[in-house]
């Protein structure tokens, strides 16, 4: 059994697993932020623009509860025990998903730009070719380590 535990510990502390766990935790927190943004800020604004309507109270009664319909709100319908189709909450979920997808897209796009810039950065020149034997020698070398020919001092490299 100790072999199993050792193997599990090795798996659990690998960098990728820890990175994934951190990503999931931050993703959960980010989802809460987006949910609040949609529910507390965007939906009231959208509702105000379309006549003071609250999406979270859009529902269809499929089966009435103990009290007869109509119900003033989704909470009232649930309290009465009615079976409802909550399409307003679905609209909220779609808006939340679109915002999360947009945020992830922007984040990945920025990360890809940074990676591309890092890949395009020119490498620092640290060696040169010997003009006699064509072997690679350090830039500061005054003699070739392969053919022992004297080399001209290297010209200073200018930044592009």
Image (cartoon, helix red, strand yellow):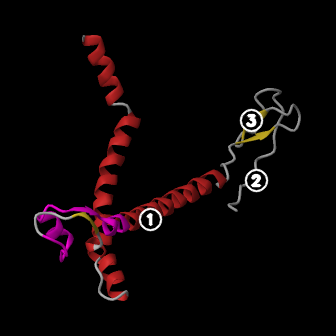
Q: According to the image, label 1 marks what residue?
A: 98
Q: Is residue 105 left or right of residue 57?
A: right
Q: Secondary structure at mark 2?
A: loop
Queried whether the magenta region covers residue 76, the answer comes back as yes
Relative image position of residue 140 (x, y in whole percent): 70, 43
The C terminus lies in which quarter of the figure?
bottom right
Up the image or down, 154 lies above or below 106; here it is: above
**Total numbered circles:** 3
Q: Residue at x 40, y 68 (%)?
A: 95
Relative image position of residue 12 (x, y in whole percent): 32, 29
Q: Is residue 108 left or right of residue 61?
A: right
Span colored in magenta: 68-92
The Cα–Cα distance between marks 1 and 3, rounded to whole angstroms, is 56 Å
Q: According to the image, label 2 marks what residue?
A: 155
Furthest toward the right, the residue is 132
Q: Is residue 135 left or right of residue 95?
A: right
Q: According to the image, label 3 marks what residue?
A: 137
Mark sitting on residue 121 = none
Which numbered disc, 1 or 2, marks the residue that appears first in the sequence?
1
The N terminus lies in which quarter of the figure?
top left
Q: Nearer the viewer, mark 1 or mark 2?
A: 1
Relative image position of residue 55 (x, y in whole percent): 31, 74
Q: Nearer the viewer, residue 79 or 117?
A: 79
């Amino acid at each position: 059994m100790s072999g199993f535990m050792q193997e599990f510990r090795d798996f659990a502390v690998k960098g990728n697993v820890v990175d994934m766990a951190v990503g999931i935790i931050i993703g959960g927190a980010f989802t809460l932020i987006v949910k609040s943004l949609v529910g507390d800020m965007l939906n009231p604004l959208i509702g105000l623009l379309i006549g003071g309507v609250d999406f979270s109270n859009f529902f269809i009664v499929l089966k009435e509860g103990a009290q007869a319909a109509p119900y003033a709100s989704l909470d009232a319908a649930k309290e009465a025990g009615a079976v409802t189709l909550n399409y307003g909450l679905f609209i909220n979920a779609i808006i939340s998903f679109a915002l999360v997808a947009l945020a992830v897209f922007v984040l990945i796009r920025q990360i890809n730009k940074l990676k591309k810039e890092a890949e395009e950065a020119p490498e620092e020149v640290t060696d040169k070719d010997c003009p006699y034997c064509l072997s690679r020698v350090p830039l500061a070398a005054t003699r070739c380590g392969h053919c022992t020919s004297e080399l001209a001092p290297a010209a200073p490299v200018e930044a592009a």
